Each structure stands twice: as C-alpha cells, then as structure tokens.
Amino acid sequence: MRNLNLREYHDRVLGCWTGKNIGGTLGAPFEWTREMPAVDFYTEVPRGEPIPNDDLDLQLIWLYAAEEQGVYALTPKRMAEYWLNYMAAPMGEYRNCMDNLVNGFYPPLSGSCNNEQWKNSNGAWIRSEIWACLFPGSPDEAARSAYIDACVDHSGDGIYAELFTASLESAAFIVHEIPQLLEIALARIPKESRIASSVRRAQELHAGGIAFDEARNNLVEHNRETGFGQSPLNLGFLVLALLYGNGDFERTLQLAVHCGDDTDCTAATAGALLGIIHGHAALPEKWKSPIGNKILTKCVNPQAILLPKTLEELTMRVIRLARRTLHENPTLISLTDAPTALDGIDLPELCASNAEIIWKRSPFEVSCELPFGIVGIILENGPEIQEGKPKKLRILLRSLSKTMAVLRMELLLPETWKCHPGSKVSIPGTRIGPQCGEITLELTPGDIADDIVFLPVKFLLSDRRMPEIRYLPFLHSGCVASEIRIRNGDAEARFLRRGGLPVRFPVAELSF
C-alpha cells in the first residue's frame, strides 16, 4: 500500500503555504527589476504580516471551485466562470482573459486569443501549489489539473510552465532531491518548448561550475527572444536558484530574488517547493515569525467568496479536499495515520508520463459539452475570420455515451456563408477519440455583420428528438486593438472589451 502519513502530509502542506508567503514577501519589493538586487532579509514587513500576493490568493478561487464542484468535475469552462465571478485583478493576462470570456471566447481560446503579449507570461505557474498539495506524489494528476487552470489565461509555454511547477511540487512530497525533481517535471512538458530549453540551460550552467551571476546573465541571453516578464526566463531563474541553493531555504530564496525580474514569483515558488521538502516545522523561525500565519489578499473579491484567514485554515481545507478526492480516485497515494510507505515508487516510474496528451491539445479548440458526449471543434489558426477567406474546422468526437448511436451535426449558416463539403455531418458513435481520425470542414464566411459572430451548431443523437445548440465564436479580423480600455465613472472602475478597429465594438461591462 502506498501511503503518506497524515501528520507528515499536514506538515508539508503547511510548509508549502508558509514558504509561499515568505518568498512572496521577500521578493515583492524587487518585482520587475532587471538589475540583480542583493537581499539578505525582508525589506518590507508591514505590521508583522505577509505582503498580499496574487501568487497565493488566486489559488483560493480554485480551492473554492474544487470544494463546490469536486476536483474531477472541474473543466476549463467551469474554472472560467469562477474566474469571472471572483477574480478582482484586471491586469495583464488576467484582464485579457476576462475580456475574452465576456466576449464568448472560453478556454482555451481565452488564453490563446487576443493575448499575444501575456500568453507565455508568469500568471499561471505561480498558482500551481493547490494542485500539488491536492495530488501529493502524483505529478500526472497535478499536471492534469494545472492544464485546466493554466489554459484559462495562458497558452503554449505559459501552460507548460505550470505543468512543470505543479508536477515538480507534487513529486516533492515523496522525492526530496532537486536534480531528480527537475527530471520528473521535465518529463511532463515538450522537449522542444522554451521552458524545457531554459531549464536545461540552467542545469548545464550549474553542472559546469559557472559562477552564479555569470549563469544568471547567460540565462538572460539565452532567453533574449522571449525576454523579461515571461515564463521561460523566470522558470530558468527559479531552477538556477534551486540548484545553486542546494536545498538551503534561506540561500535559495535570496538567489531567486537576486536574479531580478518577477522576483516575488520565483522566490515564492522556491519557498513553496522547499516548504514541501522540509516541512513547516523545519523552516527557519527567523523567516516565519516576522510575517506570521495570516493570509492577506488583493486579487480576490472578499465579499463573494469564503476565504481562509490563516495558513493553518487553508491547510486544513486542502487536506479535507484531498481526502475527498481520494474517494473519487482510489489509485492516488492514500493519506492515513499509518506510517508513510512508498514501496515500489522509483524515479523511472515518476518520469514515465502521459502528459503528452495534455500538451497536444489545440489552443483553438471549442469544446461542445453535450448531455450525451463531447465534441471538439478546432478553429484552424484561431477564431479570426474574413469575408471570402476559407477557414478549416477540424471536428473530433471526444466521447459519446451510446457508442452505437449516430451523432448528427449541422452548422446553421448565415445566408451568404458556405461550407465544403457541406454544413451537415454524421458521426458514428463507434468513432470515439483521437484514434478515430477527424472530420474536416472548410467554412467560407460571407457578409460579417458584427465584430463577433456566434455561429449556431445543432447536435442531434439518432435516437433523440430534441436537438442541442452550441455556438462557435468568431472574431472579425482587424477588430482587436492593442490595449484594453479602463473607464472610471460612477465611483467605480469598469472593464470594457477591446476598442474597435476598424468597426465599432458594442460595450460589455463588468463591475468590480
């Protein structure tokens, strides 16, 4: 039997959140600097409390979602609704995501579209601890949930970054050597990704005995194409600090901040990982005492969600949810009062991953969730359309509850639109999953009446009478400005969808 002792698990989860708060508080004053600050200890500790940080508090939204829905009932669309309801930080990729959502572009489109500047940035991998703590010692399960999280507001390397950190931290509950943990995490992202390239470069620099400052500057040059403020460089900084810190909590966090750039993120994630490895009791009192046990938030609507007030309360809620999740998936490592027993778990097993299924998902897939199945429709090169310019639609039957039924699908086209070879498709229920191949249609828009077009698609199972209607969102090419406008009025800020270029854009507002 594979088991984690409940007391030990509690200590490591509490260590995770405590390390997160410590690193965030240490790094926050130096965030976005391109210099190499020399820092030995906190420079800002207001009233003996931690500095509020989106790295931790955004994860409280996911905790609340998982408590209400159940971890395995979470989907990208459901996560997006929680994001809209409870997130109160209209900035960067978070802002672009909300803009996409109110305009009908649900995940993964919300992360991959109209988000070029921020899709590979740091907002996803900084919130991976919730999945690691819910799936201790199960990096594939942590990576699966990390994808559902990250695709809400990121794409490409922005997603791979969270797959990497979630699996790294999940494995840290049962493996405590940094080099081994890095290999486990690398097994869950594409080898050709920029994240993998940056991590490998950090490993090579450390193995070559390069001085830390020189190694840091080498990573900056290695990531010149993506640059500062992006996940490849900052994941490289994180790994560099972990390797050169060699498991020492204080030294590792100091090195993470010394690298510069998104310092609260790198130091907070380093602190969380080492908090898992060492446990709360072993973390230096020098770092714990000044900031206490409170949780202070800045990016979550506190009136709309029941928030834990302390790290201990957060830890207990995570543990309750993890034990509940065990009932949904009994193959997970058990959590009991019995001694920890991890017989048969070795590095080759932990490095064997099925995460390739995750990263091969298209960033432009519309998931049509039906009562009797799921149909994925991939919009080639994204949702932008032009009059008279063909766009391919790739149709995949992801699941069907009655395998011998026939699913009939029809695109309800505007009068001047065309579809080749036709707007109607029949899919036998025995053709389930990617192995069945795919059906490709070529859609040619005619007149486009608005900036955003919602194309109705009708689904009907062969033995049913009532159809289901879902919508494909399309964006009229050229209608996205480079900035999102914020209007101040009526004593509150309102969030507007993007300004129109060249046609008008109807206003949609969200109040905070």
Image (cartoon, rainbow, N blue to C red):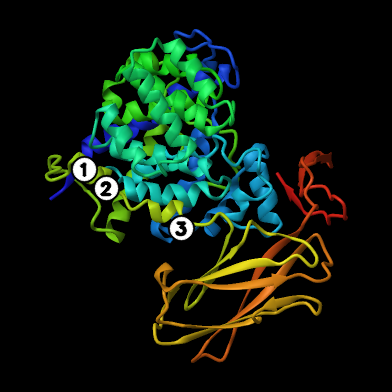
Residue 140's x, y, as percent? 33, 49
Q: Secondary structure at mark 1?
A: helix
> Alpha carbon of mark 1 to alpha carbon of mark 3: how far?
30 Å
In the rendered image, is residue 294 in sight? no
Position of the C terminus by quadrant = top right
Q: Earlier in the sequence, mark 3 or mark 2?
A: 3
1 vs 3, front mark: 1
Q: Secondary structure at mark 2?
A: loop
Give the class, few, some or many, for how many residues have Cα within 10 Å of label 1's Cα (few <14, many ≥20): few
Q: Amino acid at mark 3?
A: Leu
> Alpha carbon of mark 2 to alpha carbon of mark 1: how far?
6 Å
Which numbered dot is residue 352?
2
Residue 379's x, y, as percent? 62, 62
> Alpha carbon of mark 3 to alpha carbon of mark 2: how far?
25 Å
In the rendered image, is residue 420 in sight? yes
Which residue is the site of mark 3?
Answer: 74
Residue 155 is left or right of residue 405, and the answer is right
| Residue 372 in the image: above or below residue 484 | below
Which numbered dot is residue 348?
1
Instruction: Tell whether label 2 touches label 3 (CB within 8 Å).
Output: no
Residue 24's x, y, as percent? 49, 24
Instruction: Tell whether label 1 touches label 2 (CB within 8 Å).
Output: yes
Residue 214's x, y, as percent? 46, 11
3 vs 2, front mark: 2
Give the class, few, some or many, for how many residues have Cα within 10 Å of label 3's Cα (few <14, many ≥20): some
Could you tell me which residue is drawn at 34 percent across and 46 percent down? Answer: 134
Quarter residue 202 falls in: top left
Q: Amino acid at mark 2?
A: Ala
Q: Earlier in the sequence, mark 1 or mark 3?
A: 3
Q: Amino acid at mark 1?
A: Pro
Quarter residue 312 falls in: top left
